[in-house]
Amino acid sequence: MLLHGFTGLFTPSIKTVMEQKSNKNIVTEFYRNVVRLRKSEMIADYVHENYIQHSPMGKDGREGLFEMVEFLKKLPPVEETTPSPIVNLIAEDDYVVAHLDIHFMGKHIRVIELFRVQHGLAAEHWDVTEEPTGKNEPVINIKGLINEVGLRDNEYIIDLYSKIDDVIIHHLIAVHAELKQAGKSTALFDIFKMKDRQITEHHYVKQVVPEKMMHNNGMF
């Protein structure tokens, strides 16, 4: 296993906690105003002009988001009573992770995405999406796992991934990793919640990296 410049602290400082709230608000308002309410004119309020896109389905920059919102405008509006798709929202330093459960155009889609926020604007974005089928299996099976070796939570998670061949961890606020097997590259996002040395929740998505994307940035 390789670790590729991952970021992540499990005990943020008071200053970081204050920054978290600001960055969470930026992402939450972006989802509501730009994605849900489809106000494409507000994209510049939340997104850097040199926005770096890693999602395989989006273009670089604000223009890619503008095209997405213009497409959404052609669909029926979201009912005001529709619950928010945000299941978990985690912020640490300049990064915000959003875990979404979406019902869209007749499909059920699970998404975990990562934003890098710079000077109050989203500057970079990664995501992994997956349609749950009942056969989706995580790379890490948490059944029966307990941290018995006294490692800190983040060290314990790294140790779990170290037992898997051909894995590169790119970020660790949520585990954003790349799995290479049988000549294919798969993008992973895993969110672990831990209490008293045990993993109490595990949310995950996997997506085979497509050969062609709408940009040249890759998924990592």
Image (cartoon, rainbow, N blue to C red):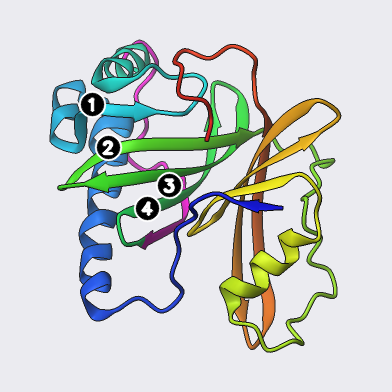
Residue 137 is left or right of residue 68, and the answer is: right
Disc 3 from disc 2: Cα separation: 27 Å
Residue 80 is left or right of residue 197, and the answer is: left
Badge 3 is on which residue? 83
Residue type, label 4: Val
Neighbor class of circle 4 (other Cα within 10 Å; few <14, some 14-19, many 20+) is many
- Depth order, front residue of 1/11: 1
- Depth order, front residue of 132/14: 14
N-term-proximal mark, 4 vs 2: 4
N-term-proximal mark, 1 vs 3: 1
Magenta stretch: give its range: 73-91
Badge 4 is on which residue? 96
Badge 1 is on which residue? 50
Residue type, label 3: Pro
Does 86 appear in magenta? yes
Disc 3 from disc 4: Cα separation: 21 Å
Residue type, label 2: Ala
Q: Where is residue 199 in the image (x, y as percent from the top left)?
A: 68, 74
Q: Position of residue 188 (x, y in %)?
A: 64, 43
Residue 114 badge: none
**Residues at badges 1 and 2 in contact (C-beta under 8 Å)?**
yes
Badge 2 is on which residue? 123
N-term-proximal mark, 4 vs 1: 1
Residue type, label 1: Asn
Does 19 appear in magenta? no
